[in-house]
Amino acid sequence: MNASPATTSTSTALSAIIRNKRFLGVLVFILVCGTWTLVHPSTRAAFIGPLLPSRLDRTNANTHHLSSTSISETDPLNQKGDSSSTSSDRYALAAEDRVTKLFSSKSEAQIEVEWERLGKSYRAVRDEVPDVTRLDLHANRFKVVVQLDQFDRAIDGSRLNATMRETYHKTTRHLRDDLFRSLYPYVSRNDNHQRTFDDLLMRYSRTAGIVIPCGNDQFQWAVHLIATLKNVHKTKLPILVAHSGQGDLTVEKRAALRSLSPDVETVDLLHIFDEKHVGLENSGWAIKPFAILASPFKETIICDADAIFLQDPAILLTDSGYEQTGTLFFRDREIFPGDGNVHAWFKELMKGRKPSKMLQKSRWWLDEASREEMESGVVVVNKGRRDVALGMVFVGFLNTREVRDAVMYRQTYGDKESYWMGYELGGVPYYFDLPYAGIAGRVTHPNAKGHTVDSRICSEHHLHLDYKGRPLWWNGSLYEDKRHREKGWFLALHYTHGTVDWDCEPEPWCMKGIREEDVKKFSEVKLEDGTGFDRVLSDMIGAALVAELKFPK
């Protein structure tokens, strides 16, 4: 929080406010909030309660906006890093510029009206603690944090004098930080040192990197992933391996992973977050949102240990949708249409909210085309953007122990839907790669003898493509079957996009009825240097084998 203005400046400012009757209400509110830190928490409501309306209409809460290099093993967030710009910087700056211009043409009276509306919202969410299952109401509380943060930044672009801007800054930041700490205590290591949102942002000191959550059971896959990233794709992005507790990933395995490349480090998330809130020990999928928040990288690419990239993942940071929104999410397979209660549950949460432009394009939303919307094997987030970072804090909240056990993981499959649902409910823009997941494998024609051809590809590896339609990454490791290493390496020859029927009765699942023109051969699709993807896959298996031989046990 910025330092208070000097006494003389404050006196001058207060005199000016008093001469302007329109700001008498602001004066009273600021004087009260200025004493806030001296008051015991139990008596705060007595000071500020009478100043703000007691309730907020749910619809208004939903629609009100200010405007329609070493990484420490104990805590990587403390480390300093480079400050070079990335390709998405111009979009981030443009987004920030839009916020700071919100008040550029507003008068003092109009800004006061905005402040009074925001104060009403603050009072409503501060006084009411919703049931843990009411994620819509929790999203309303999150929105007030966003609005306070936007108001604070918009003041800088206003025509108010410097003293008035500082007065607004001081009060707004105090309310924002107090509400943030109250709603999201999990972001702190313990109750003795509570982080504010700005504390969190200041610790994202490095530009971009890859995060791989990994436990003992995923060690072999992580070895393959890191070896292929560094030795085949030659990625320059540093890698952070995240685990939760000393037993989750043994000391020996951590050392082995670090030995694969000088820019691979490990971090224990239990050294960063409050375990009583996050419950990360033996938590499985839940580790991933917290690994994103814990990484020191502004631009974070998180991937499952069994994910496999067929190109340098740095290409993800140049995706146009990512550059514009600061997020990049991938769709799951288009399977199990209308299955389960998840669609009805989420539509109930969305009552009174206008679906985002991205949701309005979603077949999951429009016609319940699949049970799952998102594949969280790879998630890309730019935490250098304040709105995006705040969105991730809300996603983290959805994955805290109490919320995931009571509602989120009861309605959805692990962490995967929490990302886009968190951003959607919170009103923060996000971007989905439009195609559904495809598949990689080998084409077969099982019905050829019956004079019909049912072209299909059966495998455990659902595939995502780049904007040129080339293989980018798949989930399922480099093995034919990650659960049975004895079946050998995955020797894929063909792939296709995701808009085809699936047969989910046998295992592995099969994509069936594939048109001949939709089948692509790995050997016929090339990188910019002319290398075929069959050669890329061969090199990857070779690199994985060499790395695997380093750790025979």
Image (cartoon, grey):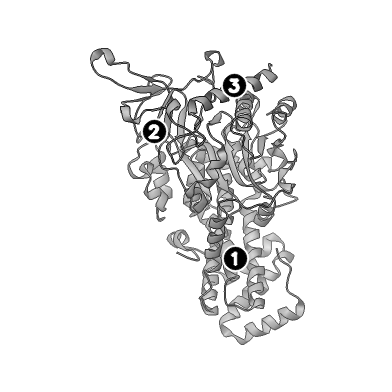
> Which residue is more in the foreground, 207 or 121?
207
**Residue 497 got which mark?**
2
Judge whether 19 appears above or below 427 on screen: below
Within 10 Å of disc 3 (Cα), the crowding (few <14, some 14-19, many 20+) is some
Within 10 Å of disc 2 (Cα), the crowding (few <14, some 14-19, many 20+) is many
Mark pair 1, 3: CA separation:
51 Å
User: Which quarter of the rendered picture does the N terminus lie within?
Assistant: bottom right
Question: Which residue is tagged 3?
Answer: 542
Judge whether 163 appears above or below 524 on screen: below
Three-letter amino acid code of the residue under disc 3:
Gly
Closer to the N terminus: mark 3 or mark 2?
Answer: 2
**Is there any visible trace of residue 54 in the rendered image?**
no
**Residue 239 got which mark?**
none
Relative image position of residue 513 (x, y in whole percent) = 31, 26
Mark pair 1, 2: CA separation:
43 Å
Find numbered disc 1 in the image and state the secondary structure of the residue it sits on. helix
Proximity of marks 1 and 3: CB atoms separated by less than 8 Å: no
Mark pair 3, 2: CA separation:
27 Å
Closer to the N terminus: mark 1 or mark 3?
Answer: 1
Picture residue at 65% right of the left edge, 33% below the top: 281
Question: Which residue is tagged 1?
Answer: 153
